[in-house]
Image (cartoon, helix red, strand yellow):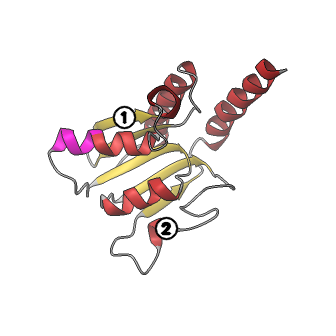
Amino acid sequence: MLDDIACMREALREAEAAFAAGEVPIGAVLVDAAGRIVSRGHNMREVWRDGTAHAEIIALQKASRELGRWRLGGLTLYVTVEPCPMCAGALVMCRVDRVVYGAPDAKAGACESLFNIVQHPALNHRLEVTAGILEDDCRAIMQRFFRERRRRKD
């Protein structure tokens, strides 16, 4: 069985890398059933100037290249913040088994908060969802980032 806390700590390491790069600090890791990290990603929208360069999308793309397939069944995505509609849709399209997130996103969350794309009955695939793993830590890095950003604008 996967250790959700240990895996989320790895996602938080990715969020720290995003923070250091000046990106919104969201990190993700894709893990197989044996607990092996298949891929990692963190937000790169500003650096790459690409609105689709979310942590989840980067991790999905890397996993597909690593495994040589687009169907990513058997994998769990750990992400520090609840996926947005784009990322939730990508998780469904890639057939990921499970998504585990830390902090909910009341403005764009598409796993439970605002929408529930990953479990929508009209779609051909549904994911298991686990929320709130290391939620306080995941929320804290976001708050720290935006607090520093506001401070720099003053």
Q: Residue at x 38, y 56 (%)?
A: 90
Count the labels in the image: 2
Q: Is residue 120 left or right of residue 137?
A: left
Disc number at residue 79?
none
- Answer whether labels 2 and 1 touch (C-beta < 8 Å): no
Magenta-drawn stretch, dominant element (helix, strand or loop): helix
Q: Which residues are the magenta region? A: 62-67
- Among the 4 quarters of the image, the one containing residue 48: top left
- Whole-percent x and y of residue 92? 37, 63
Q: Callout 2 environment at 10 Å: few (<14), some (14 to 19), or many (20+)?
A: many
Q: Is residue 65 magenta?
A: yes
Tell me which amino acid carries mark 2: Ile
Q: CA distance from mark 2 to mark 1?
A: 22 Å
48 versus 76 height, above or below: above
Q: Secondary structure at mark 1?
A: strand
Q: Residue at x 14, y 45 (%)?
A: 68
Q: Is residue 125 left or right of residue 64?
A: right
Q: Earlier in the sequence, mark 2 or mark 1?
A: 1
Q: Read off the residue under disc 2.
A: 117
- Whole-percent x and y of residue 119? 46, 71
41 versus 61 height, above or below: above
Q: Is residue 74 left or right of residue 11?
A: left
Q: Read off the residue under disc 1.
A: 40
Q: Callout 1 environment at 10 Å: few (<14), some (14 to 19), or many (20+)?
A: many
Q: Secondary structure at mark 2?
A: helix
Q: Residue at x 77, y 18 (%)?
A: 152
Q: Nearer the viewer, residue 59 or 127?
A: 59
61 versus 107 height, above or below: above
